[in-house]
C-alpha cells in the first residue's frame, strides 16, 4: 500500500504539470497511466508533430514538451506507475480514497485527479480482412519514427487533421503518397487541405476522395498493395509499402464511468473554482473535464491544474489559508524546487 497525498490518473502534459503545481505547494503525488510511457497523446500519437501554442515556447514537438515537463517535475520525486489502469477508486471511512490498478498496485490517498485526456483511447481500426496480420509492422495507427518511411510508397487513410498533417510532414520523406478519404469533404483545417490539393495538382502525390479500402495484399507482414473502392467506378489496387490509418480515436472512459461521477458525453462535469467533480476529493483536468466554455487546449489544462492544486491543498489542510507565493522570490518555493541559495 502506497500512502500519498494525491493520485493523478494520466501522465499526459496536464497530468505532469499537475505534479509540478502540487509540488510547489508541498503536496506529494503519484501518477498512474495505462500507456507505458509518459506524455499521453503527445508521445503516443504524434511525438514529432510540432506544437505552436505552448506559452513562451514558439514551437516544440510532443516528445520535447513531455521531456521538458518531466525535467520540470524532477525535484518532486513523484512515483510513476506506467502500463497500469486504475480499476478501483473507493471512498474510505476517513474521507480518503482507496485506489487500485490492474497490476495490483494499491494507494491510500487524500485526493484523486483525473487527467486522462479523452480517457482510455484507442485508434479506430481499419476493418478489412487480414488487416490485423500487418498491424504494427507495415500497417500503422500512429507515427513514432517518420524516417522509417523514407523512400517508401505510402497510402494514408483519413481526412482529418492527423491524416493531412502527416501527408504534409512525410511528403519529402516518402517516395510517393496516396491519400484516401471516405468522403468528398475534408475535416482538416482548410489551409492543410489547400496545401494537399496543390501537391496533387503539381503531380507530387495522389488523392482519392469518396473511396474506402476494401482489402490488403502482402506476404509475411509486408504489405504490397491495398485495394481502394471508389464510390463510383472500379476498384483499384494501389501499390504500397506501408499504410497509415487515421480514422480518429474511439474514446472510452473505461472504469471511470463506474465511479459515480457526473458524466457528460464521455467527459466529466467539474466546477470552475476547484475543478472538482460531483464527488468531493476527486478532480478532473484536461480534455476529460467539462464546464461551460471549455476549450480542449493544453494551455487550458495547465490553468486547470494550477487551480486544482490550490483546492487540493485547502482540502488537505482545512481551515488553513493557502498563500499564493511566486517562484521568482519565495524562499520556500526555491527550497522545494532545489534552487541553490
Image (cartoon, helix red, strand yellow):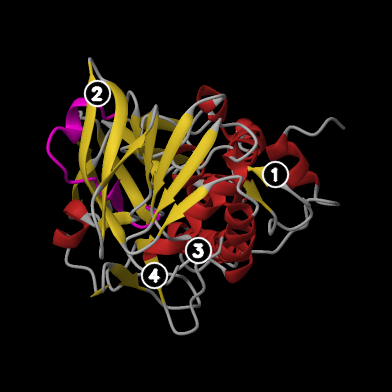
Query: Whole-percent x and y of residue 56?
Result: 79, 54
Which residue is more in the foreground, 226 or 333?
A: 226
Instruction: Indicate whether 175 appears above or below 227.
Output: above
Say which mark, if any, is on residue 218: 2
Decide which of tag 3 and tag 1 comes sooner along the chain: 1
Q: Are marks 2 and 1 in contact (CB under 8 Å)?
A: no
Which residue is more in the foreground, 51 or 330?
A: 51
Query: Which residue is at 84% across, 51% downward?
Result: 328
Q: Are marks 3 and 1 in contact (CB under 8 Å)?
A: no
Where is mark 4, residue-wise? 184
How many numbered marks appear?
4
Give the alpha-carbon distance from disc 4 to disc 3, as whole Å.
43 Å
Where is mark 1, residue-wise? 60
Which residue is more in the foreground, 135 or 98?
A: 135
Q: Where's the C terminus, which quadrant?
A: top right
Is 170 left, or right, of 245 in this rendering?
Answer: right
Residue 221 visible in rendering? yes
Instruction: Indicate whether 5 appears above or below 226.
Output: below
Q: Residue 185: within the magenta?
A: no
SS assignment for the magenta stretch, majority? loop
Say which mark, if any, is on residue 308: 3
Q: Are marks 4 and 1 in contact (CB under 8 Å)?
A: no
Give, as a single range, the part of the protein colored magenta: 116-135
Comparing labels 3 and 1, the label whose residue is closer to the camera: 1
Amino acid at each position: 500500500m502506497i500512502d500519498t497525498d494525491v493520485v493523478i490518473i494520466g501522465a499526459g502534459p496536464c497530468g505532469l504539470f499537475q505534479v509540478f503545481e502540487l509540488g510547489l505547494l508541498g503536496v506529494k503525488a503519484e501518477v498512474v497511466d495505462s500507456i507505458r510511457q509518459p506524455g499521453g497523446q503527445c508521445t503516443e500519437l504524434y511525438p514529432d508533430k510540432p506544437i505552436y501554442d505552448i506559452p513562451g515556447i514558439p514551437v516544440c514537438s510532443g516528445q520535447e514538451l513531455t521531456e521538458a515537463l518531466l525535467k520540470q517535475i524532477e525535484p518532486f520525486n513523484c512515483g510513476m506507475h506506467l502500463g497500469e489502469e486504475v480499476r478501483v477508486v473507493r471512498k474510505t471511512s476517513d474521507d480518503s480514497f482507496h485506489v487500485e490498478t490492474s497490476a495490483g498496485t494499491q494507494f491510500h490517498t487524500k485526493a484523486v485527479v483525473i487527467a486522462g485526456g479523452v480517457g482510455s483511447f484507442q485508434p479506430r481500426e481499419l476493418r478489412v480482412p487480414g488487416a490485423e496480420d500487418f498491424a504494427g509492422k507495415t500497417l500503422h495507427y500512429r507515427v513514432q519514427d517518420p524516417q522509417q518511411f523514407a523512400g517508401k510508397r505510402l497510402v494514408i487513410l483519413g481526412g482529418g487533421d492527423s491524416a493531412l498533417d502527416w501527408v504534409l510532414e512525410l511528403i519529402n520523406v516518402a517516395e510517393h503518397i496516396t491519400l484516401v478519404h471516405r468522403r468528398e469533404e475534408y475535416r482538416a483545417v482548410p489551409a492543410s487541405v489547400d496545401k494537399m490539393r496543390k501537391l496533387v495538382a503539381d503531380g507530387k502525390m495522389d488523392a482519392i476522395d469518396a473511396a474506402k479500402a476494401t482489402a490488403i495484399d502482402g506476404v509475411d507482414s509486408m504489405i504490397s498493395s491495398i485495394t481502394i473502392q471508389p464510390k463510383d467506378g472500379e476498384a483499384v489496387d494501389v501499390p504500397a509499402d506501408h499504410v497509415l490509418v487515421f480514422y480518429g480515436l474511439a474514446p472510452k472512459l473505461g472504469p471511470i464511468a463506474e465511479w459515480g461521477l457526473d458524466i457528460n458525453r464521455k467527459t466529466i462535469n467539474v466546477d470552475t473554482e476547484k475543478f472538482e467533480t460531483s464527488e468531493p476529493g476527486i478532480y478532473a483536468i484536461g480534455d476529460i473535464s467539462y464546464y461551460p466554455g471549455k476549450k480542449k487546449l493544453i494551455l487550458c489544462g495547465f490553468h486547470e491544474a494550477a487551480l486544482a492544486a490550490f483546492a487540493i491543498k485547502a482540502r488537505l489542510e482545512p481551515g488553513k489559508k493557502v498563500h499564493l507565493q511566486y517562484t521568482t522570490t519565495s524562499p520556500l518555493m526555491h527550497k522545494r524546487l532545489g534552487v541553490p541559495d
